[in-house]
Amino acid sequence: MVTKYTEAELLEMTPHEYRSMVRKGEWTESTRDVCPGYAATDIVIISKEYAYDFLVFCHRNPLACPVVDITEVGSPHPPLLAPDADLRTDLPRYRVYKDGQVVDEPTDITKYWRDDLVAFLLGEAASSLYRAWKAANIPFQSKGTFTTNIPLTPVGPFHGNVAASCRLFENSHDAIRAIQIASRHPLFHGPPIHIGDPSAIGIKDLSQPDVIRPAGQIPPMQPTDGIAMFWPCFGTVRGVAVEAKLPLMIVDYPLHNFVSDKLAEELALL
Amino acid sequence: MVTKYTEAELLEMTPHEYRSMVRKGEWTESTRDVCPGYAATDIVIISKEYAYDFLVFCHRNPLACPVVDITEVGSPHPPLLAPDADLRTDLPRYRVYKDGQVVDEPTDITKYWRDDLVAFLLGEAASSLYRAWKAANIPFQSKGTFTTNIPLTPVGPFHGNVAASCRLFENSHDAIRAIQIASRHPLFHGPPIHIGDPSAIGIKDLSQPDVIRPAGQIPPMQPTDGIAMFWPCFGTVRGVAVEAKLPLMIVDYPLHNFVSDKLAEELALL
């Protein structure tokens, strides 16, 4: 994508400056490498009618659905993470579902906004865990996202199985350190839900993920040996959304997250 | 109170056995020393009509309102903490508010129960923090509960200031260890919200608490010197409840909590 900004300028932008650029339509790409250190989130926008069930669902499935912020009904401004942001325009791309079907993947959802909508912001691992592991010199390889046989606790129309991201670590020491560090970030999916044998959680073939994540800045590593660990990811909520068949549900397009004013470390637990 | 059980029997009871005794009306006293190690909670029972606002309020004020479990609408059974418990009968005493006024303090709320009620269970510090500190040989003195000038983030009809429990520690080392240990228990109010000068949070006189807590098993300590730390407590929610003036709201009577099947350590974070 062509922008008028250099790579160095992009790296030094504040989240406020970055979101202004997105709002003006000058950035419609992935948020993976923007505003390093700042917490990014996935978003789920639904009608108030379903908001209580969804919030109870998140409470009962906290590792899969870590709610960091909630807007007032009808307001697109996240009060905790960035009160001056506008969730209708400040993400580079969205995915709009009607009755469980994708109907649009726009870069602006102003035309879909209504006074009865609520936005939930859910912590996103790459902005926090990946960076924290890198800072601790823990290499890992992202193996993609898989459907598991781990059931979510259902609430109202929301039900399904955990979708998990697989990350491969070189050795026990790195795996244990990775668990310790992830445990500091419960708002970004926290500790893994499984370690070791993928078949124990219903994954038959690690070479056949549902979604392949780009490796990005992750150091190269041989996938033939190592310790596999699994984290619930936002694909869980997308899957649940499809099954719930809500009349309207808007989420962020994969890898096109909301970039908040808070550093991931500001939201860490210990 | 006369019960047919000896002190030793009481200490060795499972939460299930204890709750059966309460249900039969054989125990209407404080839960402070029953079923040691098991997580106790405060409860808030309100109409579904107000449940979404209340849950968002709790999410925005997590240290004051740490939600551990939520019943289905109309169900008195807490699915996570004790599915076979009945919240209408299994607490030794309740407090019933109508329009913000206390109208009853019964030992059973079956006659108040309705199909539109939801119960929220909020972690209670004495069952977790007190025990964890004692296990780590950290003496402290409970100084009672105080109204502070720290505002809660308001949501819908729910607003007010934090009510805080003051606990006095002998020295820096104990205070720091107490913070570390409390941080492992975010579902039981977690780390303190203030350390040191009480006047900084609007408390004029530490010798004049709103509520005096019984010292229980806490080792004696001179209150003249030491480090004061402050934790939000359930008095916060009671205060908010009064101000919200809901048509009906039922909470646990002070110190008469719900005793769950989960050990406090099962719910600790790290």
Image (cartoon, coloured by chain):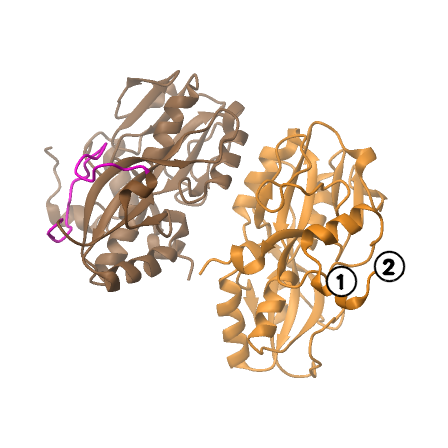
Chain colours: A orange, B brown
Q: Who's the residue at 42% across and 43% down the image?
A: B66
Q: Residue B123 versus residue A57: which sits nearer the camera?
A: B123
Residue A255, horizontal then vertical, whole percent: 75, 58
User: Disc 2 vs disc 1: Cβ atoms closer than 8 Å?
Assistant: yes
- Residue type highlighted by circle 1: Leu
Residues packed near mark 1 inside 10 Å, few (<14), some (14 to 19) or many (20 plus): some
Q: Which residue is mark 2?
A: A3
Residues packed near mark 2 inside 10 Å, few (<14), some (14 to 19) or many (20 plus): few
Label 1 marks which chain's residue? A
Asked if the magenta segment contains residue B217, the reply would be yes
Q: What is the tally of numbered marks visible in this picture? A: 2
Residue B86 in sight here: no
B223 relative position to B235: left or right: left
Q: Residue A17 versus residue B128: which sits nearer the camera?
A: A17
Label 2 marks which chain's residue? A
- Residue type highlighted by circle 2: Thr
Dot 2 or dot 1, earlier in sequence? 2
The answer to which quarter of the image holds residue B104 is top left
The answer to which quarter of the image holds residue B258 is top left
Q: CA distance from mark 2 to mark 1?
A: 10 Å
Name the secondary structure under disc 1: helix
As drawn, the residue found furthest toward the right would be A2
Q: Who's the residue at 65% across and 37% down the image?
A: A157
Q: Who's the residue at 21% across and 45% down the image?
A: B34
Quarter of the picture holding the C terminus of chain B: bottom left
Instruction: Tell me the chief SS of the magenta region.
Output: loop
Residue B16 in sight here: yes
Q: Which mark is residue A10?
A: 1
What segment carries the magenta color?
B202-223
B191 relative position to B142: left or right: right
Q: Residue B29 versus residue B240: which sits nearer the camera?
A: B240
Asked if the magenta segment contains residue B21, the reply would be no
